[in-house]
Amino acid sequence: MDELNSTIQQPTEYNDDDIKTLDWMEHIRRRPGMYIGKLGDGSYADDGIYVLLKEVLDNSIDEYMMGYGKSIEVTIEEGTVAVRDYGRGVPLGKVVDVSSKMNTGAKYDSKAFKKSVGLNGVGIKAVNALSSYFLITSYRDGECKRVEYSKAIVTEESDIQPTGEANGTQVFFVPDREIFKDYHYKDEFIEGLLKNYVFLNSGLSIIYNGKRFYSRNGLVDLLNENMTTEPLYPIIHLKGEDIEVVITHSNQYGEEYYSFVNGQHTTQGGTHLSAFKESIGRVIKEYYNKNFEYSDIRAGIVAAISIKVEEPVFESQTKTKLGSKDIGPDGPTVAKFIGDFIKNDLDNYLHKNMETSELLLKKILESEKERKAIAGVTKLARERAKKANLHNKKLRDCRIHLTDSKGDLLEESSIFITEGDSASGSITKSRNPNYQAVFSLRGKPLNSYGLTKKIVYENEEFNLLQAALNIEDGLEGLRYNKVIIATDADVDGMHIRLLLITFFLQFFPDLIKRNHVYILQTPLFRVRNRQKTWYCYSEEERLAAIAAAGKNPEITRFKGLGEISPDEFKHFIGKDIRLDPVTMKKEDLVKDMLEFYMGKNTMERQNFIIDNLVVEEDVIN
C-alpha cells in the first residue's frame, strides 16, 4: 500500500460538495444497450449482467487506487449480487443522488478521481435502473445510510444512523429478469474478471464466495496465468508512474497482448496498444542495431501494458478500445508517454540482462529465417487471396464487420464455417446478411498438426480463410467477432471441428484465447403437433417436448445440417442461437492439446470423437 500511495497523488477531501449534478439523460431502461452493450443471459463474458457487476466493482477499485480499502467482498447466490468495499463510503447526504440521478458523480471533479474508469456518471445508476431490486448502504465515520430501489424508484430510505461497521459501501442488486431473461452468472467469467482486477492492483484482495484472489507480482502474474506455452526467457517487468508493462516471447505463432487503461481491460486495444507495439519494435531494433522487420521482432511475443490516463476517452460505451490521444489535459501524447518509457526502461533492461538479450536475439533471427524461407509462397498466396477477395466463391460476406468504425451491431458480426454445399446453402439463405457471413469448406481441411506456417499460404483453403478473417497480421484486423464452426455432430463433422481447431491453435491461438471461436449447436430432433413446434437439442428436451405436445406428436430426427430447410434454420441462428465457446485453461498447454487431438494417438482421438458425437460441447475443455 505504501508503494501505491507513493505513486498516486493523494486526493483532496471527498465530501458532499464534490458531487455535481448534470443534465438528465434518456431513461436507461428504454435503451439499455446504449449503456451496457448487449444484454444476453450470462452465457458469454461480455453479456450485460457482467457489465452490471463490473460497474459496481469499478467504484470500489477506484477507492483502492486512491489509497482507501485493501479488500473487496463479492457474493453471488442464485442470481443476486452483493459487493462490499472498505473505502471511504459515499457522502451520506448524497447517497440517493449518486445512485439514482443521471450524470451525478464525484468523478466529474478530477481533483477527487483523476484516473478512474467510470467517468460518465452513469455506471451505478445503470445497475440501479436495470435491477428489480437495488440496495445501497454507505458506512462513513461511525454513521450509515441505506436506500432501497426497485427499477430505480426509491422504495425505502433510512435516516442517517449510528453504526459500528467499518467505512465503505455495500451494493446489493438483482438484475431485472424482464430485461435479462433466464440469466445466470458463470464462475469462470467472474473469476476471470476478478483476476484481472488483482493483477492490475497488487496488494488488493478480492474475496468471491469465500475464494480469495490476490496478486503480489502484478502483470507478471497475469502472463503466468494466461500463457499456454513456455516463455523463452524470464518475463521482463517494467514499472513507472502511471505505467506497467511485461514482455516475453514463446514458440507460438502470432502476437498476444493484454492491454488496460485505468484498470479497464481494453480487449480491442486502442491508442495505447498501438504505441506499445510500435515502441517495442523500434527500441529492440535500435538496441541490436540491426535492420530487423518489426514483424520478426514481435513474432511469438506475449506482452501486457497497463496505463493510467486522466479522463480517458473510449470508442465505445463498454470501454473496450481507448481513443484518447493524450495522457491528460497537460500531459504528453499517449504515444510519446509510452514511447519514452519503453525507450528508456526496456533499453536499460536489455543492457543489464545479457542472457535475456541473447535469447531474444536468437528468437528474432529464427523468425526472420522462417519468414524469408516462405517469402515466395507468401507473396503468391497474398496475390491469390487478393484476387479471391474480389470474388471469393467460398465467402458469402455480410455488411457489418467488427472492424467498422461505428455501429450498434459490430460485436454481433459472425462468420459460419460450414462443410458442403447443402449446409452452406441452408445457412446462406436463412442468415441475417447484415452481420452473418458464411465460409464454405470443400470437404475436410488439411491436418496442420506439426506443420509450419508455410502451409497456411500453400493450402488454398486455409489461405482464403485467413484472408476472409483478416488475421494474417494479428487480431486487430479481425473482421468478425464470432467465428462459428457449423458442422454435423457425426464422425466426419467432429473430425472437421478438430481439424479447424487444430489450425487455429497451431497458427492463431489468440483467436481461441480471446473467446472468438464457437461451435454451433443444432437441434437433434423436431417435435410438433398441430399448434406448436419444438426444436430439441438433447434427449431430455425431446422427452419434455413429447410430454408437452400431447397425443401422437410428429417426431423428426435431424441427421445433418443439410436436412434442415432454410425456413427452419433461421430459428437456430437467430436471437435464440446456441453456441458453445471453444476455450482454453491455463493448464491446457497448446502443444499437449495438439498432440492429444491430432497426433499419432489415433485411438484416443477416436474415443474422443465417439464420446462427443451427439453432445455439441466445447471440444477443448
Image (tube, rainbow, N blue to C red):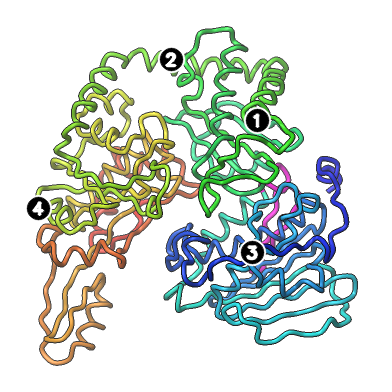
Seen in the picture, residue 361 relative to 429 is either above or below; the reply is above
Marks 2,1: beta carbons within 8 A: no
The residue where tag 1 is placed is: 333
Residue drawn at (20%, 38%), measured in percent from left and top?
Answer: 445
Q: Secondary structure at mark 4?
A: helix
Left or right of residue 181, residue 98 in this image: right
The residue where tag 3 is placed is: 23
Q: Which residues are magenta?
A: 199-217
Towards the viewer: 390 or 209:
390
Q: Position of residue 537 (x, y in %)?
A: 25, 70
Marks 3,4: beta carbons within 8 A: no
Q: Secondary structure at mark 3?
A: loop
Say few, some or many: other residues with alpha carbon within 10 Å of mark 1 (under 14 / 14 to 19 / 20 or more). some
Which callout, 1 or 4, points at the residue further toward the start of the chain? 1
The residue where tag 2 is placed is: 368
| Amino acid on which disc 2 is placed | Glu
